[in-house]
Image (cartoon, rainbow, N blue to C red):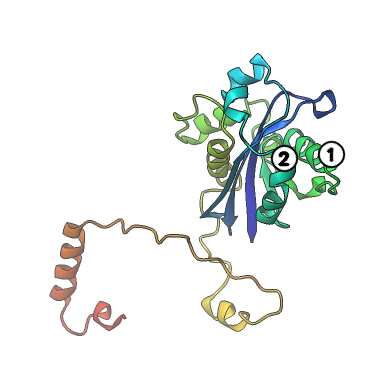
């Protein structure tokens, strides 16, 4: 299952009052695991940045002056999210801005039903407790020390970790819900999706000393050891 974790930064709180999106950050999850694919874009809001908003995200008029306007990036953004569910913290805020921007350029809004609101999940799971992104990082022991200012892509990366904790852990079912035979038998089903490859393979986590110790252990088991029969 493909999901997109998403965050935006804006010039304020109300698109109806002329506030605009200035940054979008998003990352892809496949079966609740990050694939390494991300989308990140700064956007020229075509209006001055209020000081109150600048103090939140640090994106000023001079920095945003040469960035594309939303109309120029809308298609790339929609191509990235496709029809995946959108994981958003306080989803009503981001969705109203995204849909306002889409409406201003004549594109149909995204249905609110696509949004999975981690703020609402946290409030149901921990009633009466703080449910901000920072508070949830503290609860789950997630490092958010780099979050000195709000940033859409960084916040999406942090939110992905928070979301996976909220739904039961960073690898909720460890892929045990399907047997290898089921995967083989259903691989040709119409419409079935397979996980995309990572853009770059993960680096090995074993040290050379650990690999050598493992080889020595296998050698001590003798030629009939199961390890020697594996490819």
- Identified at 65% across, 15% down, the residue is 52
- What x and y, as percent, mark residue 71? 75, 43
Disc with the residue nearer the chain's start (2 vs 1):
2
Q: Is residue 50 above or below residue 201?
A: above
Q: Residues within 10 Å of mark 1 (few under 14, many from 20)?
A: few
**As displayed, is residue 6 above or below residue 226?**
above
Q: Position of residue 21 (x, y in %)?
A: 70, 33
Identify the image quadrant of the C terminus.
bottom left
**Which of the 4 image quadrants contains residue 155?**
top right
Residue 54's spot in the image, x, y percent? 61, 20
Report the residue marked by disc 1. Answer: 104
The quadrant of the rendering that contains the N terminus is bottom right
Residue 60 in view of the camera: no
128 left or right of 198 in image: right
Q: Residue 100 appears in which quarter of the rendering?
A: top right
Q: Which residue is mark 2?
A: 70
Residue nearest the viewer, comparing 164 with 70: 70
Are dots 2 and 1 in contact, CB under 8 Å? Answer: yes
Q: Residue at x 62, y 25 (%)?
A: 130
Q: Nearer the viewer, residue 129 or 154?
A: 154
**For this view, does 178 lie left or right of residue 92?**
left
């Amino acid at each position: 299952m493909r999901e997109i974790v998403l965050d935006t930064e804006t010039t304020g709180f109300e698109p109806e009052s002329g506030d605009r999106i200035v940054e979008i950050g998003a990352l892809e999850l496949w079966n609740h695991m990050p694939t390494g694919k991300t989308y990140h874009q700064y956007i020229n809001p075509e209006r001055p940045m209020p000081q109150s908003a600048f103090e939140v995200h640090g994106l000023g008029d001079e920095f945003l002056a040469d960035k594309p306007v939303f109309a120029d990036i809308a298609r790339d953004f929609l191509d990235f999210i496709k029809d995946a569910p959108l994981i958003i913290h306080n989803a009503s805020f981001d969705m109203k801005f995204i849909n306002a921007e889409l409406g201003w350029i004549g594109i149909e809004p995204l249905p609110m039903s696509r949004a999975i609101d981690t703020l609402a999940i946290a409030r149901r799971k921990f009633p009466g407790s703080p449910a901000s992104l920072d508070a949830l990082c503290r609860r789950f022991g997630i490092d958010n020390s780099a979050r000195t200012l709000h940033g859409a892509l960084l916040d999406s990366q942090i939110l992905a970790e928070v979301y996976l904790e909220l739904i039961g852990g960073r690898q909720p079912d460890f892929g045990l819900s399907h047997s290898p035979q089921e995967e083989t038998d259903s691989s040709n089903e119409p419409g079935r999706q397979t996980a995309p490859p990572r853009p770059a393979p993960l680096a090995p986590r074993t040290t050379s000393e650990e690999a050598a110790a493992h080889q020595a252990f296998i050698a001590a088991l003798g030629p009939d050891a199961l390890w020697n029969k594996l490819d």
